[in-house]
Amino acid sequence: MLSQEEIDSLLSSISGGGVDLASLSEPEPQPTGAEFSSYMDPGESAPKSSTAKHADKKSYKLYNFRRPDKFSKDHLRTLQTIHENFARQLGMILTAYLRMGAQIEVVSVDQLTYDEFIRSMPSPMTVSIVEMDPLPGQILLGMGYEVSSSVIDRMLGGPGLPEPKARELTDIEQSLIRRVLDRATVCLEEAWRSMLNVNISIVGMEESYALIQVASAGEIVALITFEINLGNRNSGLISLCIPYPVLEGIISQLSVQHIFQRQQSNLTLEEHNIILKKLSYARVPVQVSLAGTQITVRDLVDLDVGDVIRLDRGSNDDLLLCINQRPKFFCRPGRVRDKIAVCVNEAVADEEAIKGFGL
């Protein structure tokens, strides 16, 4: 709080056109709490506290124009779901084709610029340029040298060991690895059918990502990284690069919910019949109601042996057959050998129209 002398000094300085800082014995403290109401002029705005200033600093988010986030977390999660299916299918294909165990898992799904992606990839590396018709642009599917050399060694009758020194593949080796990549694109096409129908094909192959330009340097790409383990001995990496312009037209459909809805709506007649055939072996409870009636709680408590209850159906009327406690058919009682049985007469057309049976 200012003393009376300090207040008089300030007023005289203002009237004289300046403020005499030397006349103040100590710096002016910041008013807080109850002091604020008695110190501040009602027409002035309240000074911001340190907490309010801190809140202002947190009310905005830094935006990098050189690296904008075009893929949301839901988009990346959907890409991971799609390519986890791709990894499972490719693992089974390679296991049968190479006659050795092949396990493939999705390691990470990230977004980064195309230039950062190129600089992060090793060389040499077997890279296939892939088109996803009808989507625009091209994507890149790369296989590390330790993986490609192991696969080639196994295809030529070896144990599937990688070469210790990296080198470029020969023409014959490129032809052999192309067979494996063709099978990988088939698995990729099958995995993407959960999202949309695409035709995936390889249009070219290179020995390094640096030799290929499918997007501008600052363009955002989705990078899906796989780890492959061959024969429980050797492991390597497979990478899939998808530029944002390729998925821009379907980015609104890139969600896990859309995949589930599409899977349910894309059932063929044959698949529908298979599901019905499997359901036909499921057991369901069946009850037959003879008749019913309504009584008071007093009559129910006073029931004794020999009492007679009048039902709401005649002795010659049909019985009601219920499945899962839902009325479905009218039937007649009978016997099959030494078992009590019923014969179904007709289906229940309207459950609300049923009379009797205590309903």
Image: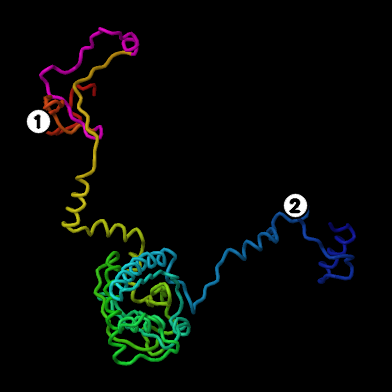
Kindly report which numbered mark, 1 or 2, lies closer to the viewer in this rendering. Answer: 1
The residue that label 2 is drawn on is: 33
Of mark 1 and mark 2, the one earlier in the sequence is 2
Residue type pointed to by label 1: Asn
Q: Which SS does the magenta portion mostly show?
A: loop
Q: Which SS class for mark 1?
A: strand
Instruction: Determine which of the numbered discs, if any, sits on residue 345 in the image.
Output: 1
Between 53 and 249, the one nearer to me in the picture: 249
Q: Quadrant of the N terminus?
A: bottom right
Left or right side of 3 for 97: left
Q: Position of residue 321 (x, y in %)?
A: 18, 30
Q: Which SS class for mark 2?
A: loop
Q: Badge 2: few (under 14), some or many (20 or more) residues near its Cα, within 10 Å? A: few
Between 232 and 304, the one nearer to me in the picture: 232
Residues drawn in magenta:
297-325
Between 243 and 148, the one nearer to me in the picture: 148
Q: Position of residue 224 (x, y in %)?
A: 41, 73
Asked whether residue 351 is drawn in magenta, I would say no
